[in-house]
Amino acid sequence: MIELDDVPPLRGPRPAGAERVRRRRTPEEAPRARVARRSVLSGIAAAGAAAGLNALGVFPPARKAIAAGYSMRGYYDIYGRCPSYAANHNCSPGCGPSLVCSVCCRTSGKYKGFHKSGVSDPGRYKLRPGQCYGSGWDGWLWSYSKSCGSCKKGVTWRCHDGWKKSSKGNWYKTICRKATSCRN
């Protein structure tokens, strides 16, 4: 008959005087690391399927992570949060306080969706480098969490600022507003 004291406890501290059990294999007992043929073939098949689906455009393109901001090498540095002066704006105009100007946005090229510049349209537009949010940024992201146009659950705008020349020759501050995400 087994006594209760003879049964080792499953939890708690090791009883006084009990030996520590070590289960280590000797080098002769250890199995050799070997990859099975099926593992290799299934890995190759999975990689091929992923590459094929990616080539067909099934997966969305990778997007740049935005934490505190990101840089596109001068004049296009975007801050990741809404500046305080636009905090109370709603769906439209959003980015404020300067005039949100859709014709001020580039419609093609590397900087599509950013403010037109003196390079893209000389004499009519120019950028305002380093004049946003404590003079370190050229634009910012601004989010609105309610229905806005076709975005039923909110929108995130990229606001990029610059100047536009009026027909009378006066320069005034403008913002190019581009939707970067639409939540439905």
Image (tube, rainbow, N blue to C red):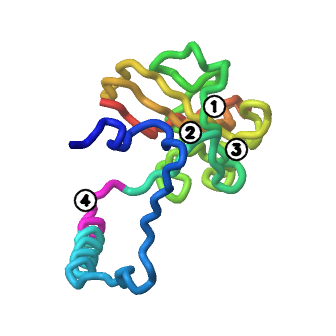
Residue at image coords 59%, 43%: 115
Report if residue 70 is visible in the image: yes
Give the labeled residue for mark 2. Answer: 104
User: Along the line of sight, which residue is nearer the eye, 1 or 154?
Assistant: 1
Whichever of labels 1 and 3 marks the residue nearer the N terminus, that label is: 3
Q: Which mark is residue 174?
A: 1
Whichever of labels 4 and 2 marks the residue nearer the N terminus, that label is: 4
Identified by mark 3, the residue type is Lys
55 in the magenta segment = yes
Q: Where is residue 126 in the image (x, y as percent from the top left)?
A: 70, 44
Question: Is residue 52 found left or right of 81 in the rendered image?
Answer: left
Residue at image coords 70%, 47%: 123
Q: Is residue 160 above or below residue 65?
A: above
The reply to whether callout 4 and callout 2 are in contact (CB within 8 Å) is: no
Q: Where is residue 94 in the image (x, y as percent from the top left)?
A: 52, 23
Gap in Å between the C-alphas at discs 4 and 2? 33 Å
